[in-house]
């Protein structure tokens, strides 16, 4: 059995402590999966809708050129925390704000991109 130190429990000794770094990494991974699934679904739906331009395919390219670096930015913000900061409850509000932004981006961007590309295609 592990013994706690005088300065408090280590991350391994405190199973109820939330590691903000790991939690953000998990959210980023799930957000990328959701974004990818939505982007493919929405783009395929646009293609079935009779769009004969290359614009829906361009929307899929945005996955690589835009969303991955954006998600990586969220993860990097939290990766630099020390072990003590990583379990500090004072970071809860900042973490929640980043999670909300991340999920709004992951869910909203596929629909926004498809609407943008459909609008461009309608003008052409």
Image: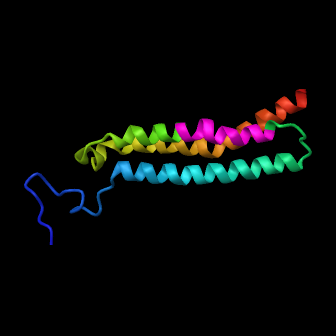
> Which residue extends farthest bottom?
1
Where is residue 8, by image quadrant?
bottom left
Left or right: 108 as drawn, with respect to 118: left
Determine if the magenta segment contains residue 121: no
> Which residue extends farthest left?
6
Where is residue 112, by image quadrant?
top right
Q: Overall secondary structure of the magenta stretch? A: helix
Q: Where is residue 28? Give x, y as percent.
A: 50, 48
For image coordinates 30% across by 41% down, the residue present is: 81
The quarter of the picture where the C terminus appears is top right
Left or right: 102 as drawn, with respect to 110: left
The answer to whether residue 8 shows anywhere in this view is yes
Left or right: 63 as drawn, with respect to 119: left
Q: Where is residue 122? Give x, y as percent.
A: 89, 31
Q: Foreground residue, 32 or 4?
A: 32
The quarter of the picture where the N terminus appears is bottom left
- Write the start and end of the magenta stretch as one range: 56-69
Q: Foreground residue, 88 or 43?
A: 43
Q: Foreground residue, 94 or 53?
A: 53
For image coordinates 63% across by 48% down, the residue present is: 35
The answer to whether residue 101 shows anywhere in this view is no
For image coordinates 67% across by 38% down, the residue present is: 62
Q: Where is residue 65? Give x, y as percent.
A: 62, 36
Q: Where is residue 91? Give x, y as percent.
A: 33, 42
For image coordinates 73% across by 39% down, the residue present is: 59
């Amino acid at each position: 059995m592990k013994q706690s130190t005088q300065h408090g429990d280590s991350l391994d000794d405190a199973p109820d402590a939330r590691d903000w770094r790991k939690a953000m990494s998990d959210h980023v991974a799930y957000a990328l999966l959701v974004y990818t699934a939505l982007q493919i679904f929405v783009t395929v739906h646009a293609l079935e809708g009779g769009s004969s331009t290359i614009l829906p395919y361009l929307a899929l390219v945005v996955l690589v050129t835009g969303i991955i670096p954006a998600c990586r930015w969220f993860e990097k913000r939290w990766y630099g925390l020390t072990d003590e900061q990583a379990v500090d409850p004072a970071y809860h509000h900042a973490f929640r704000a980043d999670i909300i932004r991340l999920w709004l981006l992951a869910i909203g961007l596929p629909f926004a991109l498809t609407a943008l590309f459909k609008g461009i295609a309608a003008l052409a």
